[in-house]
Image (spheres, rainbow, N blue to C red):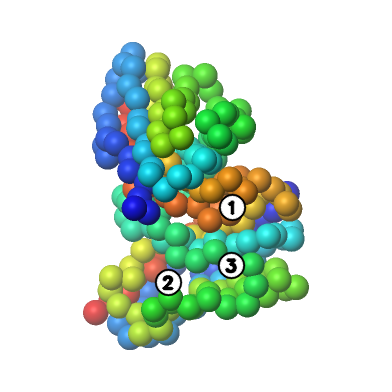
C-alpha cells in the first residue's frame, strides 16, 4: 500500500519567485498526478506523468521513478498561483484507476 | 467539452432530509468516481463505477447510495446523514483503464 509525503506543508513566496514542491511515495507506480485546488473549489488536474518531465506554461513537473520522487516547479510565480497543490498516486501498485492516495497538500500563498 | 459538471454547488440539509448530488460529463468516459473531502484534508475515494456498474465501494455507510443511470450521469443519493458527513463531495471521470482523471468543482454539503 502506497504512502505519499509532500513538502513543504505551507509555502509563502513573493511574486516572481521560483517555487518547488516535493512529493515522495513508497510503492512503485504507473503514474503520478499533480493537482491544484483553490479554496472551496474543485480539483484541477495539472499533470499526470510516469517518467521524465512535463511542462505547461510556467509549471514544470518532474519524476524520478527509481528514487520514488517527484517535484512540481512554478516559475515566475504570481498571486493567482495561490492554491493547494496535491500529489496523488495509485493506492496499490498496479491499482485500478481512480483508487488514488493523495498527499496532504502544499498550501501556496504568493504575495504581490 | 472537457468538463465534469456537479450540481448543486452548495447544499444544506437536515438529518432527516433526502437529497441527491448530481454529476455529469460528456467526454465519453465510462469510469466515474465519488470522493469525499473534509476541510483541510485530502480527498478520500468513496465509489467507483466502471461501465455503469459499481466496481469499488470503500466501505461507505448505506446512508450514501450511488447510482449511475447512464454513461454520462452519476448520482449520489443522501438520506439520514449525520453532521460529520458535512464535506466537499467531488466527482471525477476517466476513460476506463486510464489514470487521467477529470474532476468536477464539487458540492459543498452541510448537514445540520
Which residue does the image show at 56% across and 57% down from the upper left?
A88
Q: Taking B64 as reference, is B50 above or below it?
A: below
Q: Which residue occupies the foreground of this view, A85 or B1?
A: B1
Tell me the crowding category of disc 1: few under 14, some 14 to 19, or many 20 or more residues within 10 angstroms, Cα based: some
Tell me, yes or no, if residue B71 can be seen here. Answer: yes
The C terminus of chain B lies in quadrant: top left
Name which quarter of the figure residue A71 lies in: bottom right
Q: Are marks 1 and 2 on the same chain?
A: no
Mark pair 3, 2: CA separation? 23 Å
Q: Position of residue B25 (x, y in %)?
A: 38, 43
Subunit under mark 2:
A
Q: Position of residue A108 (x, y in %)?
A: 39, 68
Q: Position of residue A52 (x, y in %)?
A: 63, 77
Left or right, A3 with reference to B61 = right
Name which quarter of the figure residue A19 lies in: bottom left
Report which residue position mark 1 lands on.
B98
Q: Are marks 3 and 2 on the same chain?
A: yes
- Please state which of the two labelled residues, at mark 3 or mark 2, is closer to the viewer: 3
Number of marks drawn: 3
Q: Position of residue A35 (x, y in %)?
A: 46, 60
Name which quarter of the figure residue B84 lies in: top left
Which residue does the image show at 50% across and 52% down from the upper left?
B101
Q: Taking A80 as reference, is A14 above or below it?
A: below
Tell me the crowding category of disc 3: few under 14, some 14 to 19, or many 20 or more residues within 10 angstroms, Cα based: some
Subunit under mark 1:
B
Mark pair 1, 3: CA separation? 12 Å
Tell me the crowding category of disc 2: few under 14, some 14 to 19, or many 20 or more residues within 10 angstroms, Cα based: some
Report which residue position mark 3 lands on.
A49
Q: Are marks 3 and 2 in contact (CB under 8 Å)?
A: no
Subunit under mark 3:
A
Report which residue position mark 2 lands on.
A11
Mark pair 1, 2: CA separation? 32 Å
Amino acid at each position: 500500500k502506497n504512502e505519499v509525503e509532500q513538502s513543504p506543508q505551507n509555502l509563502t513566496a513573493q511574486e516572481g519567485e521560483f517555487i518547488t514542491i516535493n512529493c515522495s511515495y513508497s510503492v512503485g507506480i504507473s503514474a503520478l498526478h499533480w493537482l491544484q485546488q483553490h479554496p472551496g473549489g474543485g480539483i484541477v488536474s495539472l499533470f499526470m506523468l510516469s517518467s521524465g518531465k512535463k511542462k505547461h506554461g510556467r509549471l514544470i513537473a518532474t519524476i524520478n521513478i527509481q528514487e520514488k520522487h517527484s517535484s512540481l516547479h512554478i516559475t515566475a510565480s504570481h498571486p493567482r498561483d495561490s492554491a493547494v497543490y496535491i500529489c496523488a498516486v495509485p493506492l496499490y501498485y498496479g491499482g485500478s484507476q481512480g483508487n488514488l492516495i493523495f498527499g496532504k497538500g502544499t498550501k501556496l500563498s504568493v504575495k504581490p | 467539452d472537457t468538463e465534469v459538471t456537479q450540481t448543486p454547488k452548495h447544499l444544506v440539509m437536515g438529518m432527516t432530509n433526502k437529497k441527491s448530488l448530481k454529476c455529469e460529463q460528456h467526454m465519453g468516459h465510462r469510469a466515474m468516481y465519488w470522493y469525499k473531502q473534509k476541510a483541510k484534508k485530502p480527498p478520500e475515494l468513496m465509489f467507483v463505477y466502471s461501465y455503469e456498474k459499481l466496481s469499488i465501494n470503500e466501505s461507505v455507510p448505506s446512508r450514501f447510495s450511488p447510482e449511475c443511470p447512464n454513461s454520462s450521469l452519476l448520482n449520489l443519493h443522501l438520506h439520514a446523514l449525520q453532521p460529520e458527513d458535512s464535506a466537499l463531495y467531488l466527482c471525477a471521470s476517466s476513460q476506463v483503464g486510464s489514470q487521467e482523471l477529470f474532476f468536477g468543482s464539487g458540492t459543498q454539503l452541510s448537514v445540520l
